[in-house]
Every structure is written in C-alpha cells, then in structure tokens.
C-alpha cells in the first residue's frame, strides 16, 4: 500500500493500490458509456454482495444519508419506529426519526452489552411498529447484534427489519435472501457506506431494499425527501446513463474496484478473516491488561473498543502511537479518555495488526507499564490461527 500510516480506526480504513489507481483514473462525463458500464458493474456487484431480490442504490453521500433514506422510504410521519441501540450510532436513529415526525421508541443497552431479546419482545407486543432498526456493529462500542435472534423476533410482529451495516457490510454476513428460521423472516433494508469494511474512501452511500420494503414504499403517497426518495433513484440504478443527480465519478471507479476485491476474496472467506482478526486483536491486547468493552460473545468482527489500564492518558497515548505511524480512534461519550477504538477490517492484513500489537506494547512500556510484547504477539497469532482453521 502507498499509505504512510496504519489507519486502524473504525473508518475510514486502509486503501489498497488498485483502489487508489481506480480513484485516480481520468474523470469522464457521468453519461460517458465507459463510465456507465463501470457504474452498472458496481451496482450489480453490490446486488451480489447483499443478495437482494429488490433494488440497490449506490449514490453520493455518507452512511447518514443512507440511514435517512431507509427511514423516509418506509416509515411515514406519525407511524411507529422501534430503535434497538447498542451504542452511539444506534441512538442516531432516534433524532433521525423524530426529524421526520416519526414516533420513535428506543431500547438502549448498557454500553458493551446487547439488548435482551425478552425486552425487545415485550416492547414489540405493546403496539404496532412499522419498522425496527438494528445496528449490526455499533462503531462506538464494538458490540454486534445477533441477527439470528433479532430478525425472526421482529418479523413475528410484522415489522420491517432495517439493518445499519455501516461498520459490518462485507465483513459480517448480511444476506438479504437468508431465511432466519422462517421463510418470511428476512432483512428488508440494509444500508452502509464505502469507507469501512469495503475499504474504499468515504463518499458513497449504499442501500438495498427487498421486495417487501419496496411494496411498503409503493403504498406511501409521498415521502419527506427529494434527494433521498428512492423513486428518484430507481430509474438511474436500472440505467445509469440517465440523470437525476451527478454521481461521484471517480469514487464509483474506486468502489467498483473495491467490490471486485470483495467478491474475488469471497464473502465467506471475508467473514472468517474478520472474525479471526477481531478475536486475535482482543486476545493480544488482553495480555497488556487492556480489556475490550464488549465481551467476546457479543463482540463485533470489525472493530473493538479497548479500555486503558489505570494511569494511561488517552490523548498522550494516541499521540505517541501516531508518532509511530499507528492511528487509532478515541472513545465516545462517557468513555472518552477511558478507552480507544481500533479497527480490524477491510483491507487490513494480519501483518498490519500484529505490528499494531507490537507498537501498542512498546508505547505502554514507554508510559511506565511493564508488559510483555512477546506474550501479546503469541496470543494474537494463536487466536488468529485458531479461528482461521
């Protein structure tokens, strides 16, 4: 990679040479047949990744506009939305829904834990919810949602399942064709962004609606959006030579290459690799007395929120790592200053992550802690191998 630093934050994530090369290709008209062919390919590759029977949308924007599109095209003002929140980014659906006049209820987990299924069922039984939002991997806490439990539970009560895959897509299974215990129990909407496990620079919003979600949109007389109205985008996704809003030409080049790499590696291989990376990173760091916020049973494959040992100054520690070329992220909300977040997704490699374990150990020693880098590296390697086999 031509990257000068190891960007191991929850996103953006490291970008590989072929994606940089695609991004740097000559900018062409958005109606040029050569670009149109690339855009079509990107859309079809997205469909193959998510395995939807409906429509996919690849447009200019961040994951936030994808969240907005998911709501405004399925839930009308005055209708009820249930938010299952495992952290800061789950909570974002609250204000998003309220901004559009949606009646929002929320179940918030203690940070580092999952909302209990029985609590969700009790809430679902109290009233009709049009949709339920799930954050697959919350970027603030490193907690993963259990789709095997949540999807059939939500569908039992007739609600749409809206999955925020921003920090999970292409690393954790999001198969919209999968039946979760019942032929009707499927994910209805998946939304994500380009800059995390897909490994492309920020700037693209990606969202998919299955046929059930599309039927819901069809019944809505109007939606409180223009740019975010999927009816303005469906003709473009079917024929990218048509115009609604100018696409980010070079980002689409990069995204198409990123999706090529995703599918070339194979989705099952990527899921396995990310599971191994997450387990191994947490195992290695635990040898330094650094405990992950999320227990291993609920931990995400893509990032981890790691508590500091006593006496470590957050800003100084992360600045010292940055001097060594390793960039990690601070924690959010009440964990700010008490923990850091490390990404292990997308184009990251086992060599990069092992080097990160070493650099973190060296820095802890410089800060006065007596830690064994050898034991941490051994734990990292053992767990990466164990999960990979």
Image (cartoon, grey):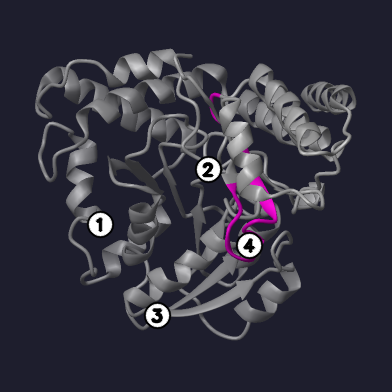
Locate residue 246, reporting x and y percent: 14, 39
Magenta stretch: give its range: 330-347
Q: Is residue 353 left or right of residue 347?
A: right
Determine the CA span between mark 4 and mark 2. 25 Å
In the image, residue 199 above or below residue 86: above
- Disc 3: which residue: 79
Locate residue 357, reporting x and y percent: 74, 28
- 11 in the magenta segment: no
Give neighbour class at mark 1: few <14, some 14-19, many 20+ (Cα, 10 Å): many
Question: Is the C-beta separation of discs 4 and 1 under 8 Å?
Answer: no
Determine the CA span between mark 3 and mark 1. 19 Å
Locate residue 311, reporting x and y percent: 79, 52
- Disc 4: which residue: 86
Split into 4 quadrants, where in the image is the C terminus?
Answer: top right
Q: Is residue 259 left or right of residue 344?
A: left
Give neighbour class at mark 3: few <14, some 14-19, many 20+ (Cα, 10 Å): some
């Amino acid at each position: 990679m031509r990257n000068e630093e190891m960007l191991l934050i929850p996103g953006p994530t490291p970008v590989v040479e072929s994606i940089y090369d695609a991004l740097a290709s000559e900018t062409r008209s958005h109606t040029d047949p050569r670009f149109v062919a690339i855009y079509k390919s990107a859309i079809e590759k997205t469909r193959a990744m998510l395995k939807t029977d409906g429509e996919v949308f690849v447009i200019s924007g961040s994951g936030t506009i994808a969240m907005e599109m998911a709501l405004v095209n399925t839930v009308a003002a005055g209708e009820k939305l249930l938010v299952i929140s495992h952290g800061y980014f789950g909570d974002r659906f609250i204000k998003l829904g309220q901004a559009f006049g949606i009646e929002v209820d929320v179940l918030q987990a203690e940070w580092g834990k999952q909302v209990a299924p029985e609590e969700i069922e009790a809430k679902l039984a109290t009233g009709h919810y049009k949709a339920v939002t799930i954050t697959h991997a919350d970027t603030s806490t490193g907690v993963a949602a259990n789709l095997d439990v949540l999807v059939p539970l939500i569908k039992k009560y007739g609600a749409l399942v809206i999955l925020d895959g921003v920090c999970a897509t292409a690393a954790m299974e999001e198969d919209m064709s999968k039946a979760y215990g019942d032929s009707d129990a499927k994910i209805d909407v998946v939304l994500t962004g380009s800059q995390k496990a897909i490994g492309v620079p920020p700037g693209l919003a990606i969202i998919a609606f299955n046929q059930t979600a599309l039927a819901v949109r069809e019944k809505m007389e109007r939606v409180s959006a223009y740019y975010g109205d999927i009816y303005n985008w469906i003709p473009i996704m079917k024929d990218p030579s048509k115009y609604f809003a100018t696409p980010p030409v070079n980002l689409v080049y990069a995204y198409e290459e990123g999706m090529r790499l995703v599918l070339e590696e194979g989705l099952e291989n990527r899921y396995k690799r990310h599971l191994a990376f997450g387990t191994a990173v947490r195992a290695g760091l635990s040898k330094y007395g650094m405990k992950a916020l999320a227990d291993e049973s609920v931990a995400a494959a893509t990032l981890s929120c790691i508590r500091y040992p006593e006496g470590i100054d957050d800003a100084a520690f992360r600045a010292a790592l940055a001097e060594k070329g390793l960039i990690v992220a601070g924690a959010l909300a009440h964990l700010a200053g008490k923990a850091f977040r490390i990404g292990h997704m997308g184009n990251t490699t086992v060599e990069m992550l092992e080097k990160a374990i070493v650099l973190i150990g060296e820095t802890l020693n410089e800060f006065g802690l007596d830690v064994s880098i050898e034991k941490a590296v051994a734990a990292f390697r053992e767990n990466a191998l164990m999960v990979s086999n």
